[in-house]
Image: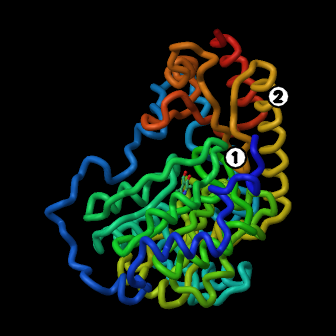
Amino acid sequence: MQRIEENPATFPDEKKTRSIMAQTVSRRHLLRGALLAGAALPFARIQHTINAWRAEEFGPIPAPGKTPYIRLGSNENPYGPSPKARKALADAIDAGNRYPGQGLSDLRQAIAEYESLTPEQILITAGSSELLGIAGLMAGTQGGRIIASHPTFPFLMRYASQFSAEWIKVPVTEDHQYNLVGITKEVNDKTRLVFLCNPNNPTGAELPRSILDPYCKLVSEQTMVYVDEAYIEFADGGVRASLASLTRDNPNIIIGRTFSKIYGMAGLRIGYAIAHPDTIDQFERYSCGANMTPSVTSLAAARASLGDDSFIAHCLEMNQETKDMVYAKFQQWGIEYIPSSTNFVFFRTSRFGSANVVQAMQEKYILIRDYGDVPGWARVSMGTVAEIQSFLDALEGMLM
Ligand SMILES: Cc1ncc(COP(=O)(O)O)c(C=O)c1O
């Protein structure tokens, strides 16, 4: 595979990026002007079909007495919640009759300290999906364009498209990396937001901070940039690879984080935004749940999990062990895959002929995922060693 630095599409220098933007953008879309203007909701345009997650996206529910499914389709962490989170959950049940105000400010404060930022730069949401919705609503109700790589995690763009946003998809390069030059070429006067997911879902590829940091600074001079860091703890360098520090003095950069992945709390629903205090103010205005959607129990579990280094180290170690199992077999069987900086692996399905691998796996009670708009590829999330062994055993039987 080509090295990132050798690929001019993924490694634009400042001069090149500025010169592209000079051709495509004729006036600045700084946050205040862009976000406050024209906030009326065009309800008539909402299409109800593509809004929310559908329960079946997470896999069928087994009938009582039937074999339970091995869930390798939603990038969940099989080791969570951590022992500390479980204890905090149990202890917090007694406070279930109270609204979560204190728990929210405690977690906000704790995250601010963990990130070396101020509490005014943090907004806690019920999973980062809520945050993606808020950003999608903000950008979508302004009309205009949202630029995103393709493939990537589509939630924000799908949501924004239901209002009046135009979703521009810039295909990843042949080496599965962001085409930053291609993205820059799409930024123009009508652009409301650029969405970057790093590391990316579903490809698992990661752009290093040394490239993304200067790039986001430049592009955010023209438009908002949402950096989805749901998998950042799995990245090379972990949270140190984050762009969170850029938000201190830049109101046009938003970072999305979640407790669903490394902390294994997908069912507990806690995520958070990191942004400039002015941007967080804007988010609060668009929040549909009066900024208190998370439950006292989930907040307590998140507070207990945050920065739990031994749990994180355990999850990372197990994740690497299972990825190595998958890589070894894929190499042996000649299955093309993208080396992953996450807890999932995206692989080509050509070694299975015309068989639908996802469906064939489901018949064996193993859930993996494909994407309708990325034919010929499937994604497997890392489960326990035993679960991954079952996946590999089943896969071997399907090779052509
Ligand atoms: C890149 C990315 N962002 C955000 C999410 C949303 O996760 P949650 O709402 O559980 O934080 C996911 C879920 O898989 C994801 O893959």
Q: Tell whether 344 sits left or right of 58.
A: right
Query: Disc 2 vs disc 1: which is toward the camera?
Result: 2
Whether residue 372 appears in this view of the structure is yes
Q: Please state if 216 lies on the left or on the right of 262 as rendered.
A: left
Q: Quadrant of ligand 1?
A: bottom right
- The image shows residue 20, relative to residue 116, as above or below, that is above
- The percent position of residue 287, horizontal first and vertical second, equals 38, 76
The extreme left residue here reads 44
Amino acid tagged 2: Ala
Which label belongs to residue 343? Answer: 1
Mark 1 Cα-neighbour bin, 10 Å: few <14, some 14–19, many ≥20? many
Disc 2 from disc 1: Cα separation: 16 Å
Q: Of marks 2 and 1, which one's residue comes earlier in the chain? A: 2
Query: Which numbered tag is attached to residue 267?
Result: none
Where residue 245 sits in the image (x, y, percent)? 68, 81
Marks 2 and 1: CB-CB under 8 Å?
A: no
- For label 1, the SS is loop
Q: Which residue is mark 2?
A: 328
Above or below for 50 versus 242: above
* Horizontal and vertical percent position of residue 177: 64, 50
Check the picture and name the quadrant holding the C terminus. Answer: top right
Who is closer to the viewer here, 102 or 313? 313
* SS for callout 2: helix
**What residue lies at 52% left-to-right and 69% top-to-bottom?**
20
In the image shown, does 88 or 327 lie closer to the viewer? Answer: 327
Callout 2: 10 Å neighbours few (<14), some, many (20+)? Answer: few
Judge by depth and name the residue closer to the eye, 365 or 276: 276
Give residue 27's position: percent from left, percent from top.
39, 84
- Residue visible at 69% across and 29% down in the picture: 336
Q: Is residue 231 above or below residue 251?
A: above
Note whether ligand 1 is within 8 Å of mark 1: no
The type of residue carrying mark 1 is: Asn
